[in-house]
Image (cartoon, helix red, strand yellow):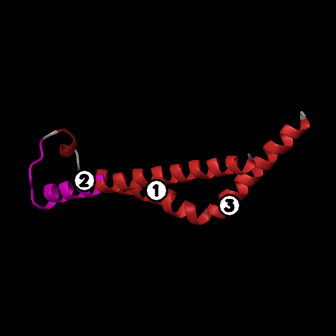
Amino acid sequence: MENQDSKSILQQLARDRVNKLKKFYTHLFIYVIGIVFYILKTYFNVPFNFLPLRYINEFVMWVWTFFLVVQGIQVFFAEKIFGSKWEQKQIDKILEKDKTSNNKWE
């Protein structure tokens, strides 16, 4: 039973990781499209007079770049710092704590 619990926890962690990667790559794809529109507007003077593209300027692109970099750091470098060994130790601690707390009431 304990092996199944840890396996399901690991599967949930894997699903969460894949979901974070999916969100990051979706954000990156939309960002690249935004860069293309920014370049067209800024350097080729293409008039974009409809709502979201009207407000693309250098400040917006800097802020957007900052948030994309932060998201990338969270997705990729958090894995380096808090890797699978760290996650496994935390899971083992939680399972052990749960196991000992269940034994107190038996």
User: Label for residue 86?
Assistant: 3
Quarter of the image for residue 39 reads bottom left
Q: On the image, numbered disc 2 is attached to which residue? A: 34
Q: Position of residue 73 (x, y in %)?
A: 49, 60
Disc 2 crowd, CA 10 A, few/some/many (<14, 14-19, 20+): some
Q: Is residue 79 left or right of residue 4?
A: left
* Amino acid type, label 1: Val
> Please, which residue is most extreme toward the top here?
105
Marks 1 and 2 sit apart, C-alpha to C-alpha, by 18 Å
Residue 106 to residue 98: above or below = above
Q: Nearer the viewer, residue 1 or 98?
A: 1
Residue at the (16%, 58%) spot, across then down: 42
Element class at badge 3: helix
Q: Earlier in the sequence, mark 1 or mark 2?
A: 2
Closer to us: mark 1 or mark 3? 3
If the image is split into quadrants, where does the C terminus sit?
top right
Q: Which contiguous range is marked in magenta?
A: 30-49
Which image quarter is the N terminus in?
A: top right
The residue pinned by badge 1 equals: 70
Main SS type for the magenta part? helix
Count the labels in the image.
3
